Image (tube, coloured by chain):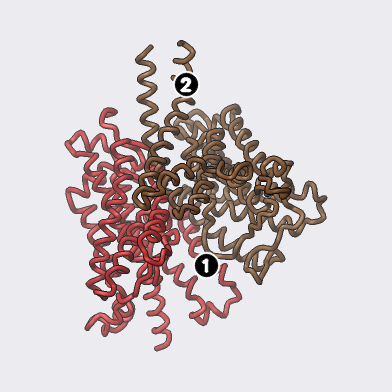
Chain colours: A brown, B red
Amino acid sequence: MKKITRILSAPAFASVMSSLAAIAVGLLFGFFILLVSNPSQAFAGIWTIMKGGFSDGFKGIGNVLYYATPLIMTGLSVGFAFKTGLFNIGAPGQLIVGAFVGIWTAVNCAFVPQPILWVVCFIAAMLAGAVWGAIPGLFKALFNVHEVIACIMCNYIGMYLVNFTIKNTNTYDQLKNQTVNIGQAAIPKLGLDKVFYNLKGRYMDISSVNGGILIAVILAIVIYVLLNKTVLGYELRACGFNKDASRYAGIKEKRGIMLSMTVAGALAAGAGALMYLAPASGLHIHVIEVLSAQGFNGIPVALLGLSNPIGIIFSGLFVAYITQGGYYLQRLNYMSEIIDIIIAVIIYFSAFALMMKQVMAGLVSAKK
Amino acid sequence: MNSFMQTFSFLIQQMWIFAVPLLIVALGGMFSERSGVVNIALEGIMVIGAFCAIFFINTLQNVMSGQGLLLLAILISIAAGMLFSLPHAYASIRLRSDQTISGTALNMAAPALAIYIARMAQSNHVQQVQFNNTFRIRAVPYLADIPVIGPLLFQNTYITTFIGFAILAAAWVVLYKTRFGLRLRACGEHPQAADSVGVNVYKIRYAGVLISGALAGLGGLVFVIPTSTDFNATVSGYGFLAVAVLIFGQWKPMRIFVAALFFSIMKTLASAYSGIPFLKSLPIPSDIYKMIPYIMTLIVLAFSSRSSHAPRASGVPYDKGER
C-alpha cells in the first residue's frame, strides 16, 4: 500500500496520468466531429485513429518512427528553450537553414569517405543551426530584443536566405525548382528496415524508418542529462524559473540566454538534417516562400511532453502515431485534418490537466 | 514628375494593403496583453475570422455584392474572432493555465478547422473558398480629387482601410481616456492593486481577450480581401508578424501604428522594387530585397529596445487567493 501511494504521489506519474486524460478528451472530441460529419462510419473512424500506426503492421510502426524523428528533434529544441525561460518560435528558420547546410555539405564534400559523410553533413547542419539560433539569443542578451520577435524575423530571413543560396549554388535543380539529390550522404538504416517491413508475397514492403530515430532518442537523453545532471543545466533552468534570483545568485544570465538559443537552434537544425538526409525519402527543399510547417510542429510536441526531454520522445511518437492514423482515415473518406484538431484539443486540455495534477496531488497527500 | 507621383501613390496604396491588417491585429493583441493575457493565438483567430467571413461572402455573393456585403462580412469576422478567442480567455483567466498552451492549441486548430469545414460544406470538396472581389473603391467621391492626399488615401482603396484608422483612434481613446482603459492597464500592470480597489480583474481580462479576438478576426478578413480571390486556410504568418509589430510598438497604439507603417513600407519596397527605376537598376536579387523588411526590423529593434515597456503582469495568471 505504501508503495502504491509513493507511485501515485510521484510527480512523473501525475504528469503521465494528466496527459492520458487530455488524450482521452481529445479523442472524444474527435469522435464527436466524426459523428457530426458522417455518423455511419464514426466508430470505424475513431478506431482507425486509435489504431494509428498499427493499422499497417510493422511497416506502419516503422513509418511512425520515421515521422516521429523530426518531431522529437524540433520538440526538443522548443522544449529546451522553454525550460530555460525562452520561447523558441524560430524553429522553422533554424530547421531550414540546417537542412540546406546539410544538403550543401552532402553535395560539395563528396571527398569525405561515404560511411561518415552523413555524420559530417549532420554536424555541419547542427553548427549552422546553432549560429542561426544564436542570433535571436544575441539580440536578446545584448539589445534586450524580445526573443519571440527576433525569432519570427529570423524565420523569414532564413527562408529567403536559403531560397537565395539554393538558386545560386550547385544544389539547385532548376527544372523542379528544388534542391538536388543528396547522393551518398543518406543516413544509414542500421538494419531498422530489416525489422519494420510488411511481407507482400516475396516482396518486402519496407517502411521509411532509418537511423535518424536513434539519433533523436540519444540526443533527447543527452539533453535530459544536460538539463538535470549538470551545473550548466541547473543554471539554465534557474534562469527559466526566476532570472532575477539567478542573477542575484551569480549566474551569468546573458550567457545562459545565448547558450540556450544556440542549443535550441542546433536541435531544430538537426531535425532538418535528419529529414532531408533520410534515405530514399524523396524529400527536397522546394524553393517556395512558405515557412517550414515542421518547424512549428515542435511547439505542440514540446507542450505535450511538458518540455521534459524524455516526455518529448513519447509526445513526438504519439503525434506521429496519431498522424499516421489520420492518413489511414482517408480510406473512410474523412479528412486527415481532423488529427490536427484532435492534437489541438489535447494540448488545450493538457492545460486543464496541469490543474488536475495539483488536485490529484492534494488528494493523495490528504489520504496519508 | 507626373510619373513619379503615379509610382509614389501606387506604392502608398500598396502599403496600406500590408499595413492595415497588421495595425488592426496588433491593436487587438495590445488590448489582450495590456489586460495581462499574452495572446499568441492571433494567427489562428485571423484564420477563423477570415474563413467565416469569406465563407459568408461565398454563400451570398450571388445575391449581394459591394460594400453592403463587405460590411456584413466584417460583422461576421468580428463575431467569429470573439467566439474563437473565448477558449483562450477561459483557459488563461479562469484556469490560470500557461497562456502559450491554449494559444498554440488555437493556432493549430484554426487552419485544420477551416480546411475541414470547407471540404465538408462545399459541393466541390476543395479547401479553397473562392470569392469575387467587388469591394475595391476606385475613387471616394469628392475626396479622391484632393491633390496629393486624394491619390494616396482615397483612390484604389477599401473601406477597411478607413475602419483601420477608426480603430486606431478608438483604441487610443479607449486605452487612455476612459475608465475601462485605465482599469485594463491596471490589470496588466498590477492586478492585485486593481483588485484591491474593487476592479474585477477576471472581467477586465475577458474583455481584453475578446477585443483582441474581435480585432484579429476582422484583421484576417482585411488581410485576405485585397490580396487574393480565394481563401486557402492561411494568413501567411501575419498573426505572428502582428505579435512582432505589437512588441515593436511597445504595446502603445501610436507606436504600433508607426511600427506597422515602418514594416509595411519596407515590405512594399521589397515586393514592388522592380517598379521603381532606381532600385531596379541596383544589382540586388529579389530574394535579398525580400529579406530587407525583416533585417531592418531587427536592426531598428536592436537600437530601440533598451528599455522595454511590456505590461508587467502580462502572461501571469491572476489568482485572487494569492493576494
Q: Considering depth in this image, is A326 or A155 the residue closer to the camera? A: A326
Q: Considering depth in this image, is A52 or B273 the residue closer to the camera? A: A52
For disc 1, the chain is B
> Residue B177: where, in percent of width, then height?
19, 53
* A153 sits to left or right of A276: left
Question: Label 1 belongs to which residue?
Answer: B290
Query: What's the mark number on residue B177?
Result: none
Q: Quadrant of the N terminus of chain A?
A: top left
Label 1 neighbour load within 10 Å: few <14, some 14-19, many 20+ = many
Real-space CA distance between mark 1 and mark 2, rounded to the nearest whole angstrom: 52 Å
> Residue B247: where, in percent of width, then height?
39, 52
**Amino acid at dot 1:** Lys
Q: Is residue A235 above or below residue A87?
A: above
Question: Label 2 belongs to which residue?
Answer: A10
Residue sitting at 23 percent across and 44 percent down?
A: B204
Taking the image as drawn, is residue A137 in sight?
Answer: yes
> Residue A242: where, in percent of width, then height?
44, 33
> Residue B56: where, in percent of width, then height?
29, 65
Taking the view exactly as shown, the residue that stands out farthest to the front is: A201
Q: Quadrant of the C terminus of chain A?
A: top left
Residue sitting at 52 percent across and 65 percent down?
A: B292
Q: Considering depth in this image, is A297 or A126 the residue closer to the camera? A: A297
* B218 sits to left or right of B43: left
In which quadrant of the rendered view does residue B159 lie? Answer: bottom left
